[in-house]
Image (cartoon, helix red, strand yellow):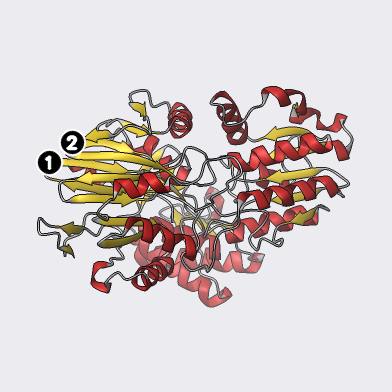
Amino acid sequence: MGRNCTIFEYGQDIIVVDLGFDFSGYEFPGADYLLPDTDYLEKNKQRIRGVVLTHGHLDHIGGVPYLIEKLGYPVVFGSKLAISLLQEQLKERRITKAKTQIVDPEKSLNLGVFQIDFFRVVHNIPDSFGLAIKTPLGVVVHTGDFKIDDNPADQKPLQKDKLKSLVKKGALALLSDSTNAALPGRSVPEKQVGEIIDQIIGRAEGRIIFTTFSTLISRVGQVIKACQKYGRKIALVGMSMQKTVDIAHKLGYLNLDEHLGMFVDFKEIGKYADKKILVLVAGAQGIEGSSMVRIAESKHWSVRIKRGDTVVLSSSIVPGNELAVHKMMDGLVNQGARIIYRTVLGSGVHSSGHAFQDELKEMLRLVRPKFFIPIEGQHYMQAAHIDLAKEMGLRGQNCFMLYNGQILEIDERRQARVLKKRVSHSVVLVEGNKVGILNEEIFKIRDRMSESGVCVVFLPFPPASKKQGREVSVIVRGLTLNGQMIQEIKNKTKKLAKKFGMKKNAKIKIESSLGDFILNKTGKKPFVIVVT
C-alpha cells in the first residue's frame, strides 16, 4: 500500500505509471514519508518517455516532487485535477523545472512504442482513470484505483463499453487494484454515505467537527449539501483542506459560488451558535502535526473541543496508522467530544473507493486477460485477488504476485516469467528536506532511545579532580534514575576511563560497558553517549 509506482519497458522505451509516497508509520520513527526506490529509473532516465498519473491521491502523485529531478524531469501526464494537485505539491517543494501536461482522456497518448488510452473509473476523487496500454505484444490494462458504482453520487460510471472496445480480443495482461480483494460482495455506494451524513448533520445538537481525507472531494460536496439544508456554516481548517477545496472549486468539481455565504473564517467560529457551525478539518489519519491531531491534543491555536461537540471521522484507517488514529480519538473523547466512527457502514462514515470481490470479478470479465498481476493492497489481499482470478477461469501459472523490485517479462511468444534478477528496492525515506536510503542502524538507535531512553555522560579526559571543577556529569532523558544510581554511573565511568584510557575505540567500549551496567541495575539498557 502506498508509494505506488509501476514501470513498463519495451526495447528502449520506459513509461512510469504513478509515483506516490506512503506515510512512514511506527516502523520508522522520525521519518516523514516512504518513497519508491527509483535507482533503476535514475540509471535509465534517458529512456523514460513519461510519467502517467492515474489520479490525484498522494499515494500516486506524492513522490513526484521528491524524485522528478533524479529522473531527469520527464513530462508528467495526468488529468486536470491530478495535475493541479501535483502543481501545488511542486510549489511547496519549490520545484520549478518539472514539466506537466494535462491529458485529453478522449485521445490516445503516444509515448515511444506505447499507446495509452484512458478509460474513466469511479474512485473517491474525481478525474480517476484506468489505462489501456497498447504494446507491440498486446494491450496491458492498469486499472488504477477503482470501484464499480453504476450510479455514483457526483461522477460518471466506469466506461465499460470503452474498456471492452479497447480489449476486443482480450488483454495481454491485467494489473488490478487489490485493496479490498478479501471483502465479499460490493462496495457501499457513495450515495448511501451521503444519506448518513445528512442524518448526522440534521440530528446533531451542538458543533460538528468533520474530518476526512482532504482530497475526498465527493465527501466535501456531500457535507456542503447537508449544511446548506440544515443551515450550518462551514469553517475549513488545515492548509491541505483549504487548498484542495479551492482547486476543486476553480476546476468546477465543487460549485461554491452559490454557497459562498456558507463559508466562514475558522478564527470566527465562536461568533455562531454551536448548532449553526461545522468545522471541516484535514488530518483524519492521525498524522503528527496535522490539524486534527493538534485539535485532539488541545494544541490548535484556534479550534478547541468543548463538551457536546460531535466529531465525525469520515475515512477508513490507512494500514499502519491505526495507533495514531486511536490515540487521536482518545484525545477527542477525553476533552468531551462524541465520536462517530464505526456506523452501519462498517468502516466509518465512509465508502471505500476500492472494489470489493464482485466488482473485481466484473473487471476480470470485462478485460479477459491472459496474464493477471494484482497491484496495491497487502500481500494477503493480492493473494485473495489471485484466488478470484482463478475462480474466473485464469490458469494459476498465468497469475503473478510480484514483490517490490521483481520483474515480470513477457516475451515475443507471449510467454511470461518472473526473472531471477531484481532491481534495487531499498526503503527510501523523506526526513524534512532530505531524501535517502534507509540507514537501519539509525532506526535501531531511535527504537532503543524510544524504548529505554538516553544517557549522556560528560567525561573530562583524563579524569580530573573535583577541585578543578571538571568532575564526571550525567544527563538522563526518558529513563528514571535516582541520585544514588546517577552516582554509581559516575563511579563506574571513572573506573572504565582508567581501564581503557585513550586506547583506540575507548569511548565505544565505555559506552557499551555503561549500557550493560545500567541494564543490570535497572532492567533497561538506554542508548549511552560519552562526551569527552
Image-quadrant location for residue 443: bottom left
Image-quadrant location for residue 370: bottom left
Q: Which mark is residue 12?
A: 1
Percent across and percent down for residue 292 are: 67, 45
* Residue hosting label 2: 112
- Identified at 36% across, 40% down, the residue is 118
Percent across and percent down for residue 190 are: 62, 49
Residue count near mark 1 (Cα–Cα under 10 Å), binned few <14, some 14–19, many ≥20: few
What kind of residue is marked 2? Answer: Gly
**Above-or-below relation of 37 to 279:** below
- Identified at 16% across, 61% down, the residue is 421
201 or 325, which lies in front? 201
Percent across and percent down for residue 181 are: 46, 65
Badge 2 or badge 1: first in the primary sequence: 1
Secondary element under disc 1, as helix, strand or loop, is loop
The answer to whether the residue labelled 2 contacts the one labelled 1, judged by CB atoms less than 8 Å apart, is yes
Secondary element under disc 2, as helix, strand or loop, is loop
- Identified at 14% across, 59% down, the residue is 414
Q: Is residue 418 visible?
A: no
**Above-or-below relation of 73 to 279:** above
What kind of residue is marked 1? Answer: Gln
Residue count near mark 2 (Cα–Cα under 10 Å), binned few <14, some 14–19, many ≥20: some
